[in-house]
Image (cartoon, coloured by chain):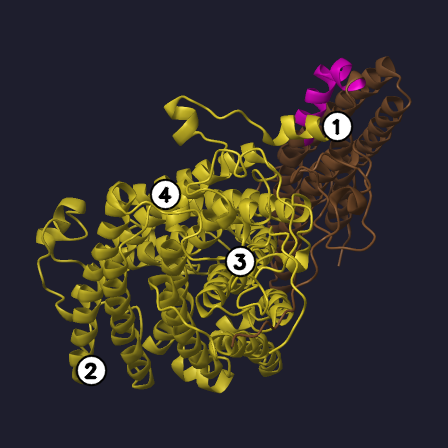
Chain colours: A brown, B yellow
Amino acid sequence: MATTLTPPKPAAPPIDARFHGHGNGSGRNGFGGSDGGPHRQYSEGAVPERVYLTGIWLTIAGIAMLFAAFTSAMVVRRGISFDWVDTQLPHVLYFNTLVLFASSLTVERARQSLAAARGVQFARWLYGTLVLAFGFLAGQLLAWQQLVARGVYVSTNPSSSFFYLLTAAHGLHLLGGIAALCYLAFHSKKIARQLSKRVAVDATVVYWHFMDGLWIYILVLLAVRF
Amino acid sequence: MAEAYAEEVHQHEEPTGFIRKYIFSLDHKVIGKQYYFLALFSVFVGMILSWLIRIHLVWPNAHIWGLDKLSSVGAPGGAMTPEYYLSLLTLHGTLMVFFVLTTAPQSGFGNYFLPIQIGAEDMAFPRLNMLSFWVTFLGLAVLVSTFFVTDGPPIAGWTSYPPLSAVGSSSGPGEGLGQDLWVISIALFCIGSLLAALNFIATTLELRARGMSLMRMPLTCWSWFITAILGLLSFAVLFAACVLLFLDRVGGTSFFIPGGLIVSGKVMNHSGGSPLLWQHLFWFFGHPEVYIAILPGMGVTSHILSCFSRKPIFGYKVMAYSIMAIGFLSFTVWGHHMFVSGMSPYTAFTFSIFTMAIGVPSAIKTFNWLGTLWGGRIRYTTPMLFAMGFVSLFVTGGLSGLFLAQPPLDVYLHATYFVIGHFHLVMGVAAIFGIFAGTYFWFPKMFGRMMSETLGKIHFWATFIGVYCIFMPMHFLGIAGNPRRYSMFTDNFLVPLMPVHKFMTIAALLTGAAQFIFLFNLFWSVFKGEKAPANPWQATSLEWSIPSPPPFDNFGGKHPVVYHDPYEYGVPGASKDFIMQDSPEIVAASGD
């Protein structure tokens, strides 16, 4: 006779008793499949937020691995050979850092404005963030231009290779954030009206802060002399 | 709000036009089939390449019909040059590892069945899902295009070690545009895989139905989930490596190219790079990749063994924890691919210990599979045969891994046929058996018809015996010192081994021919197979609770609630010998 090695659990109690009336019984509702006992309770709005936010955190994990690989390559490349000559960083990078840091503050103010139901201010802070974001990118291009003027190109030295590589990779990922900011800015009125759209703001803000932190990490990596 | 979410994220209307329904579809089931057929195309191209490789090895002067049409330079008059042999070897490996073993079990079956098995209507991000497939398709198109560029596909192998892969066309045919395209293709594949991994993880974490706790998920879902985590963490690193390699090739940088390198009598204008840096980055991806290929096969095997033994899987929780342990350990062992690179013996010892540690969760899984079979009322269906074949191949191929995990032995066996025999059995053929098992098992659900069991069994026995005939002798060849990557065996010590090679080539041709039985069965059954009921195997997981094939939104507007563990077979006191996960049937817990 066949045995059951995982004894079957009693059938679940009625849905209403188990889930406290939240959701609509949908498989989509993100209950996370608890199997009895006290269940996590989510506000209705938490469901979409969680999916998008999970998505953005996973994106961040992937990007972090990409830059971890670049970092590892840089540390190894610097350590194994005798041709490494540190590239003197253009001073404009420090100004750019302040600009990007300011953009993190403005995007945070945008989120706060939305939470306080101040739609007009929400849009203004978003546009302010966009101006700062484009300012940062322009500053990065200026840094490149200054290096080129000094005769420092991608292939000049391994340190300059990593400089261009890391700043370009960060800039490209920042463009993704800028695209999201543009979407939010163009749809700011709709977002201010529709609660379900607010998760897009939260996800963008998390990503933008990560871009800010990532840049500071890159700057330290490039600036520190081992 | 939940409705708003459903409207925005999932409930894309069922499309009616051909393009949106079958080409640029957002439906995870269509995308799953797209991945499956992409892998099917790749596996047959890869298999034909392996035929050409094997024929060249034993009959190096053979004029192969039509080969000169593919490349008049690489195969003048149909006789392959040694360089073209390496080109075909490179494409065989790249197609099989990336576009078959990584694609079919995870992106193919996973896309189709993960949402259904956890009770969801679709993946978390359907548009991202479509994008991942088309980026992967583009990657394949770029790779296949290397056949048609002037100097042919690259010759640097699927691992593309620099400096050969980095210094450009002066290092050999295919190392110009062909190698550029290879790097672009793999970079595209990485992007597609990263997007897919993100989607799989978010779907598993967030879209499970009521009652579907993590520990109630079928082991298939566990394997897709952990595989996706491995993919997210490892493909990002391979992408970084591809960017660096591409810059070395076209940007004049020196990440991987050492100084003073002379290629074809010319001093390279590079300095100070390290080819070993590529090896570290590549294998940091490459070893998890082995498990990306095999973990879904383990999940499918567990699922099928339980179903056709009519017993619960032996030690469900331990099986799930073993998948996690294998996933974690896979990131700690990449150095065992580099024992001959001159690494410190202490480092090699560390990698060796971690490598052998993987044997622990692997053995747990194997014994649990045997425990599942023990005392079961086994139904020898085609999917069951392939699942049992998977266990056999995984054990056979895995045991030789213990040899290679020891640095002193690896120094001798490295770059011999022993390694080829090992990884083809444990990573290649075992994973392919997982794909076959999944195909025969899920075909009724995917296409609404049954495959021919007779043809399936002929296919199984021909393939099972065939692969052992091909790959077991490779171990003996390796012990005899037969190097890999040689295009001809003309050295004195290799000539006596030629009869073994001829045997393997004939076995490869026959085993390959048997795959056309499968191909016929597949396409014939799509149109002419017997109509499949909703649950032809009397299985328990959610995909069998819905019609075959499933409706557009999977559950026909209903929302499943899960009451049971995934492998409730042979439950004493139950009305049938199985209880479906969404069945509200109450059964008192009892033992034997």
Residue at the image point whose x is 11% and y is 54% from the top: B78
| Quadrant for the C terminus of chain B in the image | bottom right
Instruction: Of the two numbered discs 2 and 3 on the same chain, state the one appearing first in sequence.
Output: 3
Left or right: where B117 falls relative to B587:
left
Query: Mark 4 vs mark 2: which is more N-terminal?
Result: 4
Local crowd at mark 1 within 10 Å, few (<14), some, or many (≥20)?
A: some
Same chain shared by disc 2 and disc 3: yes
Q: Mark 4 vs mark 2: same chain?
A: yes
Number of residues whose C-alpha sits closer than 10 Å to that of mark 4, classed few (under 14), some (14–19) or many (20 or more)? many
Q: Quadrant of the N terminus of chain B?
A: top right
Q: Nearer the viewer, mark 4 or mark 2?
A: 4
Q: Which residue is mark 4?
A: B447
Q: Which residue is mark 1?
A: B1
Contact (Cβ within 8 Å) of mark 3 with mark 1: no
Tag 2's secondary structure? helix
User: How far, Cα to Cα, is label 4 from label 2?
Assistant: 47 Å
* Residue B523 shown in magenta: no
Q: Secondary structure at mark 1?
A: loop
Q: Horizontal and vertical percent for residue B104? A: 42, 51
What is the three-letter code of the residue carrying label 4?
A: Phe
Chain designation of label 2: B
Compute the Cα span from label 3 to label 1: 31 Å
Tell me, for residue B220, which label it has, or none.
3
For image coordinates 70% across by 26% down, the residue present is B4
